[in-house]
Amino acid sequence: MDEKDKKIKELEDKLSEEIMVKKSEVRLNQELCEKIEKHLLTIETLQEINEDFSNKIAKLRFHIKKINELTYIP
């Protein structure tokens, strides 16, 4: 094998490695995008749950105030 063939082989190997790295990066990026989407969905769901609990707590506080006002004896 002469110098030229060695250089061609070396370049082919390097190209092959870079292609594998690129494919790996694409796959990793896709997985990260899916995780982000999952986290966004989780955040949205938790916001809905928090909103629901906040509404319930506000109603309960209002009722407690009314009860305290009705039972208050100066």
Image (cartoon, grey):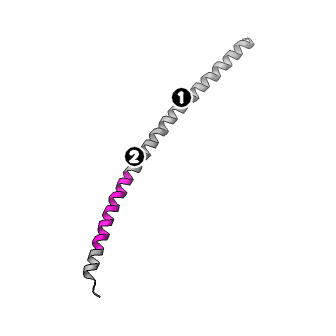
Residue at position x 32%, y 70% in the image: 61
Task: Identify the residue position indicated by label 1 in the image.
Answer: 23
- The stretch of residues the image draws in magenta is 45-64
Is residue 34 found left or right of 2 in the rendered image? left
Of discs 2 and 1, which sits in the foreground?
2
Q: Secondary structure at mark 2?
A: helix
Badge 2: how crowded within 10 Å, few (<14), some, or many (20+)?
Answer: few
Q: Nearer the viewer, residue 39 or 8?
A: 39
| Residue 58 % position (x, y) | 32, 66
Amino acid type of disc 1? Lys
Residue positioned 27% across, 71% down in the render: 63
Residue for badge 2: 41
Q: Is residue 31 above or below residue 60?
A: above
**Upstream in the sequence, badge 2 or badge 1?**
1
Question: Does the magenta segment cover residue 61?
Answer: yes
| Circles 2 and 1 in contact, beta carbons < 8 Å | no
Residue at 61%, 25% in the rendered image: 17
Magenta region includes residue 63: yes
- Image quarter of residue 51: bottom left
Task: Residue type at mark 2: give it.
Answer: Leu
